[in-house]
Image: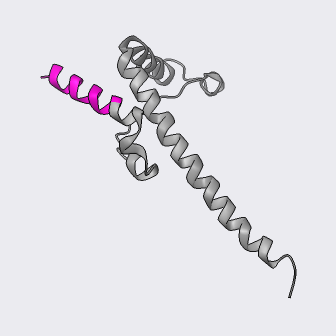
Amino acid sequence: MNDNDGEDDEQPKIATMFDRLAQRLSAHRTAALQIELARHPQAALAAVVHGMVQTALQRDRYHRDGLPLEMRLTVQDRLESMAPDWPESPAAVVLVELQKAVGEDLP
């Protein structure tokens, strides 16, 4: 029996713990970004237009890769599954309020 066997078993557990923490923090960061874009529609519009210009007008691959922003619209409501504490978080509460307010304003 090797004295290092216990340490080898700990490595996957630690890696899994770090992966879950990174995923949870990513969910909260995503929510914060969504809130800021909802609060600042001019910035959201600029991001969308930037992505459109990048795709449509800058066809040279070298320049496209050098730009700091890439925009894709993908609707995914997985934040709750990524962070168990998501529904009670301040970001979730604010995001739900913003979604309700925008939903009331849109036809």
Residue 79 visible in image: yes
Q: How is the image coloured?
A: one colour
Please determine whether, in this image, residue 104 is positioned above or below residue 14.
Answer: above
- Viewer-proximal residue, 21 or 88? 88
Asked which quadrant contains residue 15, the reply is bottom right
Tell me how many marks there are: 0
Q: Main secondary structure of the magenta part?
A: helix
Q: Tell which residue pokes out farthest to the bottom in this image.
A: 1
Please determine whether, in this image, residue 76 is positioned above or below residue 4.
Answer: above
- Viewer-proximal residue, 56 or 35? 35
Q: Tell which residue pokes out farthest to the left in this image.
A: 107
Residue 20 spot, x, y in % from top left: 56, 54
Residue 19 spot, x, y in % from top left: 60, 54
Please determine whether, in this image, residue 22 is positioned above or below residue 59.
Answer: below
Residue 73 visible in image: no
Left or right, residue 1 beside residue 92: right
Left or right, residue 79 beside residue 69: left
**Which residue is painted at 72% across and 68% down in the image?**
10
Residue 86 spot, x, y in % from top left: 41, 44
Q: In the rendered image, which quarter contains the C terminus?
A: top left
Q: Tell which residue pokes out farthest to the top in this image.
A: 42
Q: In the rendered image, which quarter contains the N terminus?
A: bottom right
Residue 64 spot, x, y in % from top left: 59, 24
**Which residue is painted at 29% across and 25% down in the image?**
98
**Which residue is painted at 62% across and 58% down in the image?**
17
96 magenta-colored: yes
Q: Magenta stretch: give its range.
A: 94-107
8 magenta-colored: no
